[in-house]
Amino acid sequence: MMSVVTIGRPTFRNLLPLAAVAALALAGCTSSRQSSTTAKVGDIDTSSASQVNISSLSAVVDQNPADASAYNVRGTAYGKAGKLNEALADFDKAIQINPAFYQAYANRALIHRRKEQDDRALADYNQAIQINPSYDVAYIGRGNIYRQRKQLDLALADFNRAIELDSPDPRAYHNRGLVYQAMGQQQQAINDFSTAISRAPNATEPYNARGLAYLATADYRAALDDFNEVVKRDKESYEGWTNQALALEKLGEPGKAFNAFARASTINPSYRPAKDGMRRTASARGQSATQG
């Protein structure tokens, strides 16, 4: 039986810094908005995680101790820097100052998720949606929790709602595709992954996910094309190399499949699907050589 790999977990690239431009201006810094339509909702520049920037944001907080947005922005920077307790404290403070600050609830939910406190994250997403029923980001975040809990109907409803709200975030389509995939509705999944790719052509995860859907529909050539794209973008993706090998194996190319499995095993020697694949294709490759 084939082993396939899916990708996806929350990251702090998704934190939502409300009024970041204004706050940085107060700190004497400059900021620029991403103009690309493929940018994820709420992305901020990676410099937000730097100690220099956190110090500047702390100066903003000191100058504006009653400004909930200042705490929200600094909490975002702390989250990106991996300082989860500091981020949580800032989002707590932002919500204390402004209990209707729905973006801060969604940001705090991400912290809870990273701390493996999904019940608290779910409560925060619920609160954000209660305050603003049109907040697409909270539906995407809550839907992902439901998806990971295998509450697929609830997850599907949330992603559908985010898409109905015309969310520009490609994760709405990518995550809905993962739900369709789990439901065995592979063509719907392929359609959603394709939309996610069109909105975020530089992302790797939708190619991997779509390739898995193509594998499930026995479109091995299309699957191989997608996995080729994955390993071209991320040469250290042992999941990508393994999935590429599975497609090659199905296409009757055991030698190439063995090489891809071996590449995956070199990157992650403890990855069992790659080792199992090497054993299968080593034998087939030897038989092919003998027959030739």
Image (spheres, grey):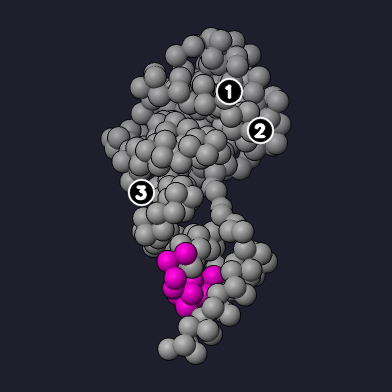
Considering the image in quadrants, where does the N terminus appear?
A: bottom right
Give the magenta range.
250-261
Q: Quadrant of residue 118?
A: top right
Looking at the image, can residue 196 be seen?
no
Pointer 2: what residue? Answer: 149
Q: CA distance from mark 2 to mark 3?
A: 28 Å
Badge 1 crowding class, 10 Å Cα cut-off, few under 14, some 14 to 19, many 20 or more, is some
In the rendered view, would you say 198 is above or below 229?
Answer: above
Residue farthest to the front, as pictured: 291
Pointer 1: what residue? Answer: 154
**Secondary structure, magenta segment, majority class:** helix
Q: Amino acid at mark 3?
A: Asn
Mark closer to the chain start, 1 or 3: 1
Q: Amino acid at mark 2?
A: Arg
Query: Is label 1 or label 3 in front?
Result: 1
Mark closer to the chain start, 2 or 3: 2
